[in-house]
Image (cartoon, coloured by chain):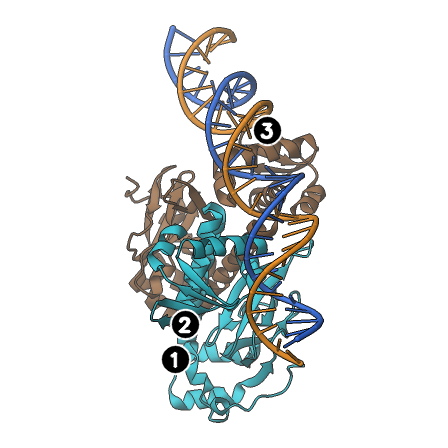
Chain colours: A brown, B cyan, C blue, D orange
DNA sequence: CGGGCACTTGATAGTAATCAAGTCCGGTGG
DNA sequence: CCACCGGACTTGATTACTATCAAGTGCCCG
C-alpha cells in the first residue's frame, strides 16, 4: 500500500536532504538534523500519493521516480496540471494554511519520496528563512510554466501545442543522440492529451504528421527522437 | 507618462503600507520605515506599467485601480494571464533572480501603485521572514487560480468557461443587488475572450444565450446582473 | 443629434471530437 | 523460439462546434 519505509542507500546515509534544492543553503550538521525529521515512503506505479480533497499534513519531496498531479472532471475527463520528478516537491499549499489538496498525485513509475511534517517544516522555515526564498523561487518557476500553459492552450493551434509539449519533454527528459534528442516519454498518448487538453486521437494524428514531416521519429510507443528541433520550435510558436 | 508621483491622502499619511497584506505582520513603526522606502506612481487607463521582456527592479503593489497582465502572441492575439486589483502585487519574479518580465501589465483604469526597490525588498524579507511567508501564500493562491484556469481551458465546454469567468468576477467584483449580484465588468468582450481563450463573437453569443435562459441580465455593455447563481454554477461544471 | 466604436447576429468554412475499425507492440505461455 | 493475446495506438468517416468573415445594431459621448 505504499506505506512501507524505504531503506535506500541515500536515505540510510542521511544524505537525501542534501539533494533537495530547497535545503541547499544548509550545512552538513543542519542537514543531518533534517534527515532525522524525514520519513521515507515508496509508491508503485499507479499508486496514489495524494487524493484530491484529502487533508494533508506533510510536504512531499521526490527522491526518485516521477508523478503526475491531476484533477478529474465530472464527465470523467482528466486534466494533468503538473509533472513532478526527482528533486521536486508538492503539498506546499497545505503547509501554510489548513487546506485540502486541490489535486490528486499518482506515481508514473516506482517513486520514493521524503515526507516532512507540516509542523517540522514551519519550524525549519522560521529558523532558516533562506528555505522560504528557495520555495518562493520554485513556486515562481511553477507559475511561469502554468502561464506558458495557459498561453499555449488559449492562443496556439493544436499542432503548436503538441510541438510545445515535445519541446518541454526534450528539455526535461531528453538525452543526446547521434541523430538529435531522444525522449523517453513520461506519459502515454492519453496522458499527453490530458496534459494539453486534447483527445488521444488528435495527439496521435499530430505526432504522425510531425513524423511524416521528418521533424520527429517515433520509436515504439514510449520513445520519440527529435530530429529537427528548430522546426519543432518554429511550429510551437 | 505615468511617471508623476502621486500625493493621495493614504500615501501622505504613510498608511498605504498598512493596507498591503504582505506587510500585515508588521507594527506601526516598521510600517513607517517601509513607507519611506516606497515610491508612488500613477498610471492612466491604457498605460503600460511593465512591458514584456523588460528588466525590472521593483515590486509593484496596487494601491488603487486595476491592471491586466498579458502576453502578445506572434499572430497578434493576446492572452490575459492575471487581473490585479487593490492590494495585489506583481513583479515578484524579478526580486529573487535577475529576470526579465514574462508579461506586460496595463492599467485598466486610473491606477496608483507603490513601488519597492528590489534591494529594499530583499533586506526587508531577511529582517521579517513573515513577509516571505505572506508572499508564498499569495503565490499559492495565484497557482490555485491558474490551475483552475488550465483545467477549465483544457476540459470544459465553452459555455462552462464563460460561466466560470462570470462567477470569478462575481466573487471578486460583485455587489449585492435586489435581484442577485451586480458585476461591473473589468474587461470588455474582447478582454473576456482573451482571458479565457475564445473570440469576442463567441463570448458575445454565449452571454446572449445565458441572458435568454434567464441566468444573467446584461445592463449596457459593462454591467452584468447574475440572476441565478446556482444555474451558473451548474453550467460552469 | 450625430458619429464612432463596441457589441450582436448571421452565414460559412475549417478543425477537432467522436464513433468505429483496424494495426502494432510487448508480454505470456506453449 | 514462436504463436497468441490484449492493450495501446493509429487511421478513417462523420458530426458538432467554434473561428472567421461580414453585416447590422445599439450605446455612449461629444
Q: Nearer the viewer, residue A116 or A79?
A: A79
The residue at 55%/71% (across/down) is: B67
Q: On the rendered structure, is B212 left or right of A162?
A: left
The residue at 43%/70% (across/down) is: B173
Subunit ID for the residue under disc 2: B
Looking at the rendering, which quadrant does residue B19 occupy? Answer: bottom left
The N terminus of chain A - image quarter = top left
Q: Secondary structure at mark 3?
A: strand
Q: Position of residue A63 (x, y in %)?
A: 42, 48
Q: Which residue is mark 1?
A: B24
Same chain check for tags 3 and 2 = no
Q: Nearer the viewer, residue D17 or A176?
A: D17
Q: What is the C-alpha distance between the residues marked 1 and 3? A: 56 Å
Q: Nearer the viewer, residue A58 or B40?
A: B40
Q: Secondary structure at mark 1?
A: loop
Q: Which residue is mark 2?
A: B134
Looking at the rendering, which quadrant does residue A43 occupy? Answer: top left
The residue at 50%/93% (across/down) is: B12
Same chain check for tags 1 and 3 = no
Q: Nearer the viewer, residue A168 or B180?
A: B180
Subunit ID for the residue under disc 1: B
Task: Confirm or deny contact between disc 2 and disc 1 (CB under 8 A).
Answer: yes
Q: What is the C-alpha distance between the residues marked 2 and 1? A: 9 Å
Same chain check for tags 2 and 1 = yes
As drawn, the label of residue A219 is 3
Q: Position of residue B30 (x, y in %)?
A: 42, 87
Tell me, yes or no, if residue B140 can be seen here. Answer: no
Other residues around mark 2 within 10 Å, as few (<14) / some (14–19) / many (≥20): some
Amino acid at each position: 500500500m505504499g506505506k512501507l519505509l524505504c531503506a535506500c542507500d541515500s536515505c540510510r546515509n542521511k544524505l537525501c536532504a542534501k539533494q533537495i534544492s530547497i535545503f541547499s543553503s544548509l550545512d552538513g550538521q543542519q542537514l543531518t538534523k533534517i534527515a532525522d525529521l524525514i520519513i521515507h515512503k515508496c509508491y508503485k506505479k499507479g499508486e496514489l500519493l495524494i487524493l484530491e480533497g484529502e487533508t494533508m499534513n506533510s510536504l512531499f519531496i521526490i527522491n526518485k521516480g516521477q508523478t503526475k498531479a491531476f484533477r478529474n472532471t465530472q464527465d470523467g475527463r482528466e486534466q494533468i496540471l503538473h509533472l513532478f520528478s526527482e528533486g521536486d516537491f508538492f503539498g506546499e499549499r497545505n503547509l501554510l494554511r489548513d487546506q485540502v489538496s486541490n489535486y490528486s498525485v499518482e506515481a508514473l513509475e516506482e517513486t520514493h519520496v521524503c515526507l516532512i511534517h507540516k509542523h517540522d517544516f514551519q519550524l525549519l522555515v522560521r529558523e532558516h528563512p533562506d528555505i522560504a526564498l528557495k520555495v518562493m523561487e520554485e513556486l515562481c518557476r511553477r507559475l511561469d510554466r502554468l502561464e506558458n500553459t495557459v498561453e499555449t492552450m488559449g492562443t496556439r493551434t493544436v499542432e503548436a501545442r503538441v510541438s510545445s509539449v515535445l519541446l518541454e519533454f526534450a528539455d526535461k527528459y531528453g538525452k543526446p543522440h547521434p541523430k538529435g534528442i531522444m525522449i523517453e516519454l513520461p506519459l502515454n498518448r492519453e496522458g499527453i492529451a490530458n496534459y494539453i487538453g486534447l483527445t488521444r486521437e488528435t495527439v496521435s494524428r499530430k505526432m504522425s504528421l510531425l513524423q511524416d514531416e521528418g521533424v520527429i521519429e517515433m520509436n515504439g510507443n514510449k520513445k520519440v527522437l527529435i530530429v529537427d528541433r528548430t522546426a519543432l520550435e518554429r511550429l510551437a510558436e
